[in-house]
């Protein structure tokens, strides 16, 4: 090995600590990496397969632009370094694809929520009970007001995530938040709209029935809610 495990880990974590987005990785994985590299040095083991598994967590948090800086201090062969760089590149591309998909889903959810709000406003303006349109009843107005506020909140968070991703395509926190909130809003708003349509809300003659069905799938694909909450959003918040 070209250098000791201790110096390799120090250089490795020192490189990570130079960048805010990598500081957490340096702190959280320093001991694990030290133990792993020590085994490689003392036992003169081949690190190939073990490296791929035990250092993937580090590689996943590293920026591709810093990949060579990160790999340089490690006692790796050229083949191992090339393999790690390729994995980091493919992982980053995959993660960016997930983030873009979540942002797109947030936009779709915002559109469905807006469509359901507008359809419900039109229906309640035309539907009459007790001699007047049901939109004149305070409970109807209360529901419409809450629906509008939630749709606006989901849309604004999605817009903010879009602007953030336009500035930095490597982010994943904001698109995940936008997807999580906007999809929940879409499900709730479409169901509230269906209730205000009464029995007609289930009939195919009214668009609200289709909006309810379309909204149901949104919290599922591009990362189900528990995954977004635990493994994407919470981990990044706690890690920072």
Image (cartoon, rainbow, N blue to C red):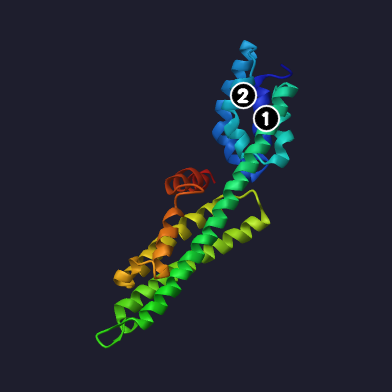
Q: Is 202 placed left or right of 154 in the picture?
A: left
Q: Residue at x 64, y 33 (%)?
A: 13
The secondary structure type at the circle numbered 2 is: helix
Q: Earlier in the sequence, mark 2 or mark 1?
A: 2
Res. 91 image quadrant: top right
In the displayed orientation, state which residue is furthest to the top: 43
- Disc sitting over residue 51 in the figure: 2
Marks 2 and 1, Cα distance to the nearest angstrom? 9 Å
Q: Is residue 115 above or below residue 50?
A: below
Q: Residue at x 44, y 62 (%)?
A: 186
The mark found on residue 152 in the picture is none
Decide which of 225, 234 is in the foreground and name it: 225
Residue 132 in picture, x, y percent from top left: 30, 87
Residue drawn at (71%, 16%) of the image: 1
Residue 183 appears in the picture as rendered: yes
Residue 6: which quarter of the image? top right
| Residue 187 lies in quadrant | bottom left
Label 1 sits on a secondary structure element that is helix
* Residue 3, x across and y down, in percent: 72, 19
Please say if 163 is above or below 148. above
Question: Residue at coordinates 57% horizontally, 21% vertically from top-left?
Answer: 35
> Quick one: 186 or 167, which is closer to the camera?
186
Above or below residue 7? Residue 67 is below
Q: Residue 106 appears at what percent x and percent y?
A: 52, 58
Q: Which residue is mark 1?
A: 84
Query: Quick one: 205 or 170, which is closer to the camera?
Result: 205
Q: State yes or no: discs 2 and 1 in contact (Cβ < 8 Å).
A: yes
Q: Residue furthest front?
A: 205
């Amino acid at each position: 090995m070209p250098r000791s495990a201790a110096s390799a880990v120090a250089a490795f974590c020192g490189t990570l600590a130079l960048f805010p987005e990598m500081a957490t990785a340096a702190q959280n994985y320093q001991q694990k990496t030290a133990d792993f590299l020590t085994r490689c040095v003392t036992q003169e083991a081949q690190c190939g397969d073990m490296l791929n598994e035990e250092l993937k967590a580090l590689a996943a948090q590293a920026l591709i632009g810093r990949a060579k800086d990160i790999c340089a201090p490690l006692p790796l062969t050229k083949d191992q370094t090339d393999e790690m760089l390729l994995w980091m590149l493919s992982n980053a591309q995959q993660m960016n694809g997930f983030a873009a998909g979540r942002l797109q889903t947030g936009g779709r959810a915002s559109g469905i929520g807006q469509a359901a709000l507008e359809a419900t406003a039109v229906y309640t303006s035309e539907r009459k009970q007790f001699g007047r349109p049901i939109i004149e009843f305070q409970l109807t107005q209360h529901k419409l007001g809450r629906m509008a506020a939630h749709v606006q909140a989901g849309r604004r968070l999605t817009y903010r995530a879009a602007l953030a991703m336009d500035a930095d395509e490597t982010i994943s926190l904001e698109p995940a938040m936008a997807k999580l909130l906007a999809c929940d809003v879409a499900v709730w708003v479409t169901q509230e709209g269906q209730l205000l349509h009464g029995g007609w809300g289930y009939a195919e003659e009214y668009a609200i029935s289709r909006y309810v069905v379309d909204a149901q799938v949104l919290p599922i694909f591009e990362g189900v809610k528990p995954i977004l909450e635990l493994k994407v959003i919470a981990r990044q918040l706690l890690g920072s």
